[in-house]
Amino acid sequence: ATYQNVKIRFHACDMQLNVDSDAAYLVQPQACSRYAGYFYLGSPQPKHYILNGAVLVTCKTIHSVCASAAEAETAGHFHNAQHAIVIKRILEVMGREQNPVPLKTGNSTANSFVYDNIPIIPITSRNI
C-alpha cells in the first residue's frame, strides 16, 4: 500500500452531523458530472475546524446533463441532504439531539440557491 501507517483520529465532540458536499462538472463520459459527500460528527460551533473520521462517504455520478457547475453542486446538495436526513433520524433515535444539518460547499452560487440567499433584481421595462 502507498500509505502503510494511516490512522483515523476521532476527537471528542457534541456529535452533531456535518456534511461537506462537492461536485465535479462534466468529468464523466456522455457529459455526466459527479458529486461527493463527506458526513462526519462534530460540534455545532467549533472554535477551530476539526475533521473527525467519516460516518459516511458518498461519490456518485449525476446521470442527467447539468447546464453549469452550480447546477451540479445543487444536485449534489440534494442527494447528500437525502442521506443526511436518514443519518440525522438515526442519531435522534439513539438519543443525540441534532441541530439543523449544515451542508458546506465551495460553490457560492449553489450555496446561495440552496439557502435562498440569491437577491431578486426586478426587471424594469424600457422603451426601445
Image: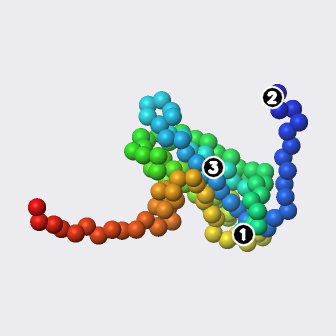
Residue at figure coordinates x 67%, y 64% from the top left: 89
Disc assigned to residue 37: 3
Q: Residue lying furthest left in this view?
A: 128
The residue identified by callout 2 is: 2
Q: Are marks 3 and 2 in contact (CB under 8 Å)?
A: no
The single residue placed furthest to the right in the displayed view is 5
The residue located at (57%, 52%) in the rendering is 106
For the image shown, how many numbered marks are present on the structure? Answer: 3
Residue 17: image location, x then y, percent? 70, 62
The answer, for residue 40, to whether it is visible in the render is: yes
Q: Residue at x 63, y 63 (%)?
A: 102
**Percent position of residue 12, x then y:** 85, 62
Of mark 2 and mark 1, the one earlier in the sequence is 2
Quarter-of-image position of residue 123: bottom left
Badge 3, how many Cα within 10 Å: few under 14, some, many 20+?
many
In the drawing, what numbered circle is on residue 45? 1
Q: Using the image, determine if residue 38 lies above or below residue 98.
A: above
In the rendered structure, which amino acid carries the disc numbered 3?
Gly
What secondary structure is marked by label 2? loop
Measured in 3D between alpha carbons, the distance from the residue under mark 3 to the one under mark 1, in whole angstroms, is 20 Å
Secondary structure at badge 1 equals: loop
Q: At label 1, which amino acid type do we have?
A: Gln
